[in-house]
Image (tube, helix red, strand yellow):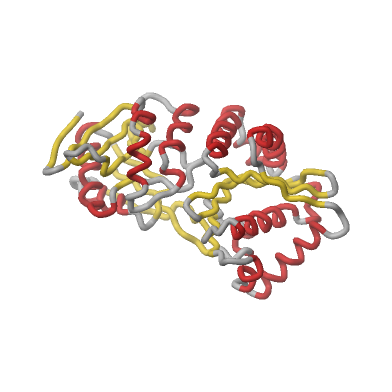
Amino acid sequence: MTCTAPNLVVETLEEDAFSAIAADWESLLTRSVDNRIFYTPTWHRIWWEHFGRPGAYLVTVRDHDGSLEGLLPLQMCQQDGRHVLTLTGDYNVMDYMDGVVEKERAPEILRMLWQHALEQLHPDGVELRHVPSSSLLIRALDEVSGGSRVQVEDDEVCPVAILCSSWDGYLQMLSKKQRHEIRRKLRRSQEGVEWEFRSVASEEDLDRDMPVFFRLHELSGREKARFMTADMREYFCAMAREMLRQGVLRLSVFRRDGVDIAATMSFLYRERFLLYNSGYDPEYAAHSPGIASVAHAIQSAIEEQAVAFDFLSGDEPYKYQFGATNTPTCRVTMS
């Protein structure tokens, strides 16, 4: 399905286009309003390979020279007998969700993308999750809604800590109480024993430490254990392996006195360190393994010159102990 506008061509592609337009998609990300790891073609492709179902569409805008100027990855879902249009993916594993659009003409292109999607796909409604509150996508949908009601609500918060050039400098940015607690818990985790904080650097390391990560993740609580189904394990393994090949994965294990007691899975993407998931053995809770592993992850982020440490979705209290402040995401519905 294709339509044209002055100097622009809008087209709807089927799901098999995820790989076919990957290079153009990556190029667009470098020119886009926003660029996050969850918006990459790699992330969408791997999610689709593991959880996709019929009904995915890539709505694209190209100029007449063929350059990709905008993209909305969409899927049609059945909800209570209604056809509801959502962004491709799953908000349980994608902490930010949005379109990808060239920043110089973003409002115009987003309106074109939504207009085309609504006219060609005829959804009964739209439901979007984890959309950054600053996203231009929200206003564009409202402008082409044709009288349908667009509602924007708070969805999640993603606490983010700003980093600096050294660990000591970062600690000085925190309150005295925060600084004292982090130092105290680090000492508690390390004093009097041999310890190490190791990070995956090869596929052999990954084969060794993914089972460690899964074990510690599931030990952390019943909700995490329910989340990590066999299918989700396969997805995490595929994602970790691909991100390792791209040099983005930061999977680390905290080992104390010969025992692996905590693990973090993170990504370093465009100077932003993302704490994607973590786990620890509650039998060692007295040694603060969770706080210690996050502290080590932040130290690693600083050493790699990251400018921000994003704890991603959730308002767990420990995130604010590290000086994080909330960045909100929205739930957007149209009916």
- Image point 65% across, 65% down: which residue? 167
Q: Nearer the viewer, residue 298 or 223?
A: 298
Q: Is residue 81 visible?
A: no
Rendering coords of residue 56 (x, y %): 35, 30
Side of 261 relative to 88 (left or right):
right
Q: Is residue 40 visible?
A: yes
- Image point 71% across, 45% down: which residue? 253
From this view, report whether residue 40 is shown above or below residue 183: above
Which quadrant is the C terminus positioned in? top left
Rendering coords of residue 3 (x, y %): 15, 34
Which quadrant is the N terminus positioned in? top left
Rendering coords of residue 41 (x, y %): 41, 37
Q: Residue furthest bottom?
A: 176
Side of 89 relative to 145 (left or right):
right
- Image point 54% across, 44% down: which residue? 248
Rendering coords of residue 205 (x, y %): 68, 36
Q: Nearer the viewer, residue 53 or 180?
A: 180
Q: Residue furthest left?
A: 6
